Image: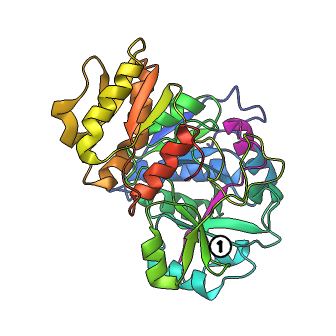
Amino acid sequence: MAAPPASSDNRLVQTLRLTVDAAHLETPAARSALAQAAEILRCGGLVALPTETVYGLGANALDPAAVASIFAAKQRPAWDPVIVHITGETVDNPMLRTLAAEIPDAARKLIAAFWPGPLTLLLPRSAAVPDAVTAGRPLVGIRMPAHPVAFALIREAGVPIAAPSANLFGHISPTTAAHVLDDLDGRIDAILDAGPTKHGVESTVLDPCQSPMVIYRPGAITAAQIRAVAGPVEVFQLAGPLTPAPREALPSPGVGLRHYAPRAHLVLVEDSFNRLPGALAKAAAQHSSQRIGLMLPDELAAQAPSSVEIFPWGRWAAPEELASRLYAGLRALDAAGCDVILCPLPPADGLGAAIRDRLRKAAHVPDE
């Protein structure tokens, strides 16, 4: 029997942890876990689910009360819209037709090229989409996740799933079930635990209705890849400063001033790779009276400053490794009791743009 949906204050819920092996979804245990999670969603409850990017906090996107529960559980402000996840065929998709009033030609090309995958498209919303999903805006963010567990859960539930990252608002996004429980245990009905996520940073968010198209949040699908498929694209730039509590709804998920933030003070260090050891040592000296954590690229392991807590971040030359381990590293250094976290900024090429975006928002640094 499914657990009852989370209460409106999301404080007295026993969170179920349902383990699923993504490589063996045909087993009775996996089928049972998926069926239980899907029933919770159909009943208006909240289920954290793995995607190929991060863990999301899912609810029936067509149920206004269920969507409101996401905002309550995350303590997320109403001005920040959420993304809806769908499943099915990429062409002639019933869920997509339910949510989107129109699908431009550019969007059709991108869907054919990148779905399922980490690309969210902002499309004109249909009347079926609750205002809370879009923060009252005319466009709804939609994507089709590539993770087999997410795909299977949405198919089993039979409804599109609204799912922002499964963490408290503004905190570090979760890439494991343990990360989700650190923030939301007792505040949500269930979590589907399928191990660590792959990409480690959220999806690219793109408006294909404009010309040129606009990237509101960089991710694993890069501007160069989008340009090659559908034409000119540019990265969103604010016309003025963004405040912590905007007066009106944000144009897209992921453009808020402060997201992905550790409890520790995050210090970003930028220099050429050959000069990074000296720059990191200088930054460490400036915070010598505090407990310091360091997101350390593998290539610099022999040159790390002394007396700091190290998180082995991955190879500097492999941005996919840096992205996949980014949030896990920030959480690990927080858990180690660091007061300050030093983190080098990778180059802005390709996936590096997404990593820089997350780090700058986590450090509360204005957009470049």
Work out whether residue 308 can be spotted. Answer: yes
Residue lying at the far top of the rendered structure: 289
Quadrant in the picture for residue 291: top left
Q: Is residue 68 left or right of residue 28?
A: right
Q: Is residue 9 left or right of residue 288?
A: right
Residue 116 against residue 176 in the figure, above or below? below
Q: Is residue 165 left or right of residue 296?
A: right
Work out whether residue 52 can be spotted. Answer: no
Quadrant in the picture for residue 294: top left
- Give residue 274's position: percent from left, percent from top: 23, 45
- Give residue 99's position: percent from left, percent from top: 71, 71
Instruction: State the count of labels.
Output: 1
Residue extent of the magenta highlight: 69-90
Residue 159 against residue 111 in the figure, above or below? above
Assess whether residue 10 is covered by the magenta stretch: no
Residue lying at the far bottom of the rendered structure: 105
Residue 109 vs residue 358, the one in the foreground:
358
- Give residue 136's position: percent from left, percent from top: 83, 59
User: Which residue is drawn at the image coordinates 62% and 35% (left, top)?
Assistant: 168
Q: Amino acid at mark 1?
A: Met
User: Which residue is drawn at the image coordinates 68% and 45% (left, top)?
Assistant: 45
Asked which colour scheme the image uses, the reply is: rainbow
**Circle 1 residue:** 95
What quarter of the picture does the N terminus occupy?
Answer: top right
Assess whether residue 85 is covered by the magenta stretch: yes
Q: Counting other residues with Cα less than 10 Å from the Cα at mark 1, is it few (<14), some (14-19), or many (20 or more)? A: some
Quadrant in the picture for residue 42: bottom right
Where disc 1 sits, the SS reads helix
User: Which residue is drawn at the image coordinates 42% and 19% (left, top)?
Assistant: 287
User: Which residue is drawn at the image coordinates 44% and 68% (left, top)?
Assistant: 222
